[in-house]
Image (cartoon, rainbow, N blue to C red):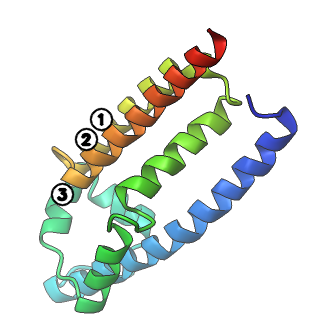
Amino acid sequence: MLPAELLPVLLTQMKKQAEMKLSSFRAVVEKLISMQNVKIGEAQGLSYDQIMKKYDGKLKELYQNLEVDDSTRLNAQQEISEDGYWGVKQTAARAIEFAKALSGGDPSKIALLRNSIEEGYKAAEKAWGGELPEISKQTLEATLKGLDDWAKEASQTTS
């Protein structure tokens, strides 16, 4: 288990890192939606939160019809690549690290964490408007495997 005094520090570090990357992602989404809205004659200047609310349950439709410039496309491909920040490996590793930190490193909470992650995935599917892209499925599988590995490791330690 993690020492209790380290939990706030670890969670704060994780939060800051995620906020920095998410801020960059939000800016890209806002720019792309704004550009798209101008092209189709809709109001521009929507914030990320307004976009998410407007397209709740229809995100798949929004992104399938979104025109993306080459620079943004290349950056996104790098970010979701095997070793990219939003790629399967790094995202699953962060999710597992976050789950461990939230639980205080208590493996008895793994079932609760697993259930919460699966519920979050279902909520994301609902917001997306259907089945999520393959990278999302792979990330979910890698995260759940990481939790399973943690459970096995914990059971071997207590045996």
Under circle 1, the secondary element is: helix
In-image side of 137 versus 85 (left or right):
left
How far from the left and from the top, in percent, is residue 24?
49, 76
Q: Amino acid at mark 1?
A: Lys
* Quadrant of image for the C terminus: top right
How far from the left and from the top, in percent, is residue 47?
43, 71
Above or below 102: residue 26: below
Q: Is residue 133 visible?
A: no
In this view, the residue in front, 13 or 55, is: 13
Front disc: 2 or 1: 1
What whole-number distance in Å separates the C-alpha atoms at marks 2 and 1? 6 Å
Q: Amino acid at mark 3?
A: Lys
Tags 3 and 1 touching, CB below 8 Å: no
Can you tell which mark lies on residue 122?
1
What whole-number distance in Å separates the C-alpha atoms at marks 3 and 2? 10 Å
Binning the other alpha carbons within 10 Å of mark 1 as few (below 14), some (14 to 19) or many (20 upward) gives some
Can you tell which mark lies on residue 126?
2
Q: Residue at x 71, y 57 (%)?
A: 13
Binning the other alpha carbons within 10 Å of mark 2 as few (below 14), some (14 to 19) or many (20 upward) gives some
In-image side of 39 versus 124 (left or right):
left
How far from the left and from the top, in percent, is residue 138?
27, 46
Could you tell which of marks 3 and 2 lies nearer the N-terminus? Answer: 3
Q: Please, which residue is most extreme toward the top here? A: 159
Binning the other alpha carbons within 10 Å of mark 3 as few (below 14), some (14 to 19) or many (20 upward) gives some
Mark 3 = which residue? 60
In-image side of 95 versus 70 (left or right):
right
